[in-house]
Image: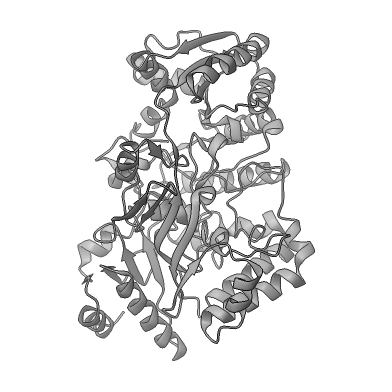
Amino acid sequence: MSSKVAHYLQEHLVGEVMTSTDARRYFATDNSILQLAPALIAYPRSENDVRKVARFTWQLAERGRVIPMTARGSGTDQSGAALGSGIMLVFPAHMNRILELDTKANTVTVEPGINYGKLQQALHTHGRFLPAYPASLEYSTVGGAIANNASGEKSIKYGNTRDSVQSLRVVLANGEVIETKRLGKRELSKKLGLATFEGEIYRSIDTLLEEQRTLVERLESDVVKNNAGLDLFDIKRKDGSFDLTPLIVGSQGTLGIVTEAVLKTAPHNQNTTLIMATFDSLQHLQDCVQELRDLSDRPSAIELVDGNLLEQVHELNPNQLKDVVKEPFPKAALVVEFDDGERQLKKITKKADKIFEKYAVSTRVATDPEDQQHIVKLREAASVLLSHNEGLLRSVPIIGDGGVAPDQLRAYLEGIYSLLKTNNVKAAVWGHAGEGTLNFQPKLNLGQVGDRQKAFRLMDAYNKLVIKLSGAISANAGDGRLRTPYLESFYGPELYGLMGKVKQIFDPYSTLNPGVKFGTSLDDIKEIIRTDYGLDHLYDNLPRT
């Protein structure tokens, strides 16, 4: 990128612009196995700065010169969505504020660069919280969570990020700003009549949804969470209401750049009951999870760690699981949380006990915060594996973000074990069992050609497994670059082609995070794999799962 571009932006933005080699090197990696250096880094101080960058790139694209824009939070993304070869817009430096806390409406308005953990702390002082928080909340941003439609341990009860987002301010590809929220028929009619890019988007999307209604309805599935591609299903409802918010959430900066969000909060109850249950049968595990999900007062978390993980953690750090679970380790353990009121807790715990009596080998109930910390250590045991290196072997995030319907949990686990055994990789699985989303990170040395080839064999086998089980290849977070090559085989050419048309409507010159969700092949990924994968961005905090 020429120095003229940098000089122009330095002159017109209030925020800083950098082109130094060390800054570009730092932003060339996120928490994925990929590496792609930006040409320029901009730290916007306001929405107006973002508008100026977008308007500038649009005008250049009109003249045939395309410079990509990538929005970035704290770079914790494991799919390569926070990487780009053009202008990197970094939000945590300045656009990191709580703009309004509405205690009557129970909403909070924030800028995208705000740290998720700090926002959570502020909400706790008012007895509220954002329930869809990811495991990385202490070192990730709310903007990143919105981009990925992130979910976490409490999503089984409260939903994912999309369920918490009430409205957004979004900078479009040409620099226009729109506010998204659910519109009635009259409000939609006004939008359809606008002689602006916004009006063009509303007209085009509305027409597309009407013409392809049958195709869009195919997006409804039994999978609890699906972040693959774009969410076209909930834009236009049967009552005629229309909202672009569900589409923007989870789109990973490919349709617009979020500059402000209004989020719904939930009551925060610190008095919880934690139950640890162990199982010697994967079928019993699945049956237990399904019955827990069917409770009228659903648990606020159903977390899984398997016996392989317990054994490996015990080998590395015997004290991690001391006084929590003993050898011989079970096939799997669940950590189940209930966060209802005190009277309800007693009633619902009794119902849960009956379920555990049928399926579990043992249970342990904790209501005292100190006792609960022991059980929490079990839930967080995977962090020991993630941060442990065996020589040049690293736990690499290449697979394991998919999800299946809860009645496929056993088949999912058995399929994962089979593909890991076939590729001579140690098994260790954990995740949100209540939603059918599991994680595992094989230890590989990406500096070796053989292990890079193995990585691609694992990715192919894993995505085929999830598709075979009618699951979603992206569930906890977004596709990024890593899973983009598999989207067409997941959705089929018709549905994926429809999503491509939506991308074209919002981003005709492909300036918004190109290569994410569209336009990346497996060969493209092979070109940008970094051979020295590490957790450099995360060591200020213990990397979570």
Q: Residue shown at 60%/28% (left/top)?
A: 298
Q: In this orientation, which residue lies closer to the viewer: 170 or 179?
A: 179
Q: Which quarter of the image is occupied by the C terminus?
A: top left
State the residue in front, 305 or 146. 146
Q: Nearer the viewer, residue 472 or 200?
A: 200
Residue 530 vertical position relative to residue 494 in the rendered view, above or below: above
Q: In x, y percent, where is residue 5?
A: 28, 82
Give the answer, above or below, for where 302 lies relative to 49.
above
- Residue 489, visible in the rendered structure: yes
Residue 33 visible within the image:
no
Q: Position of residue 169 (x, y in %)?
A: 43, 66
Is 39 placed left or right of 179 in the picture?
Answer: left
> Residue 149 or 77: which is nearer the viewer?
149
User: Residue 153 in the image: x percent, y percent?
Assistant: 49, 34
- Residue shown at 63%/15% (left/top)? 351
329, above or below 383, in the image: above
Residue 113 position by quadrant: bottom left
**Outermost bottom residue:** 63
Q: As drawn, which residue projects farthest toward the front?
A: 104
Residue 202 higher or lower than 84, as above or below: below
Q: Tell me residue 534's x, y (percent).
A: 33, 44
Task: Kindly identify the residue that appears in the image at 39 percent across and 71 percent down.
Answer: 69
